[in-house]
Image (cartoon, helix red, strand yellow):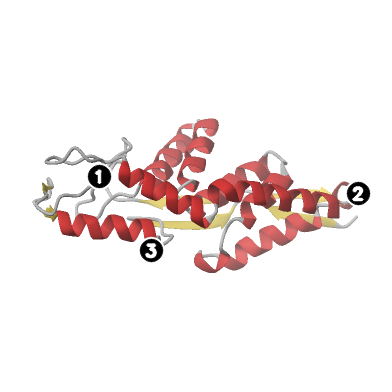
Amino acid sequence: MKKFKTFTSLIILFIASSVSAKDFGLHFDDSGNIIKPDQEFMWRGMDDEKDGFRNSAFKNFKRAAEFGNYHAMSLVALYLMQDKDYQSAHAWFKLIDLGKIPNREYMEEIVGNLETMMSPQELQQADDMKAELAETYGSYPTMLRRAEWKNSLKFTGTHIKGYIPPFLRIQLNSGMEITGQNLKKQIETFIYDYEFNFGVGEVTLDEIEIIEADETEEKK
């Protein structure tokens, strides 16, 4: 009997710096770069996954996805695949701009295998679900979410949240000094020119598990 193979798990090797993002707010690495909130939630999710707290990891990956993090979206989709919720997984994968991520061919293969397992009706339902998800995780709402994060910050010398005084100076433990101008540029780049990346460190993805579905289970 013909089998359709679908990759549902990834080895996630996250080689990060010693920076630990524990709190939601403004943090810097030792080079003076801001630690973006989506990176914070990714790290929390990675820690939860490592410690066996799957539900908490799933929630943190979704929170990272709110900022436009495609890696987080792919992990949410893979969790849903593990739960055999193929329609939801397909919807999450379709949120991702595959032209902006590494391992594009790998992701395309996963989505292609998913589609062979779904009926036309299920694919339509997945498209409808994707449209609904895009209201929170699409490019425009995620940009607004990044701006919302900026507007939640408050700096010494002003009572206006989100306002970065030009005279601001932040001294890091590494000895670096961050100026208000530099901080403003970093945050505005994060909001308006968001670039998907894995932050400090390296992430590699590789398949470790294959599940098979009988042809009779694929089409309804």
**Mark closest to the chain's N terminus, 1 or 2:** 1
- Res 111 seen here: yes
Q: Is residue 37 above or below residue 94?
A: above
Q: Residue at x 50, y 55 (%)?
A: 140
Residue 193 marker: 3
- Residue 45, given in percent of the width and then of the height, sits at 45, 39
Q: Residues within 10 Å of mark 2 (few under 14, many from 20)?
A: few
- Residue 157, given in percent of the width and then of the height, sits at 11, 41
Query: Residue 163 versus residue 91: which sits nearer the camera?
Result: 163
Query: Residue 151 versus residue 10: which sits nearer the camera?
Result: 151
Query: Residue 210 versus residue 177: which sits nearer the camera?
Result: 177
Looking at the rendered structure, the secondary structure element under dot 3 is: loop
Q: Residue at x 80, y 58 (%)?
A: 116
Q: Hey, what amino acid is under mark 1?
A: His
* Dots 1, 2 in contact, CB < 8 A: no
Residue 180 marker: none
Query: Residue 91 versus residue 112: which sits nearer the camera?
Result: 91
Looking at the rendered structure, the secondary structure element under dot 2 is: helix
Q: Residues within 10 Å of mark 3 (few under 14, many from 20)?
A: few
Residue 216 marker: 2
Q: Hey, what amino acid is under mark 3?
A: Asp
Q: Nearer the viewer, mark 1 or mark 2?
A: 1
Q: Nearer the viewer, mark 1 or mark 3?
A: 3
Residue identified by numbered label 1: 27
**Mark closest to the chain's N terminus, 2 or 3:** 3
- The quadrant of the rendering that contains the N terminus is bottom right
The answer to whether residue 5 is left or right of residue 35 is: right
- Residue 17, given in percent of the width and then of the height, sits at 29, 50
- Residue 56, given in percent of the width and then of the height, sits at 50, 32
The answer to whether residue 189 is left or right of residue 89 is: left
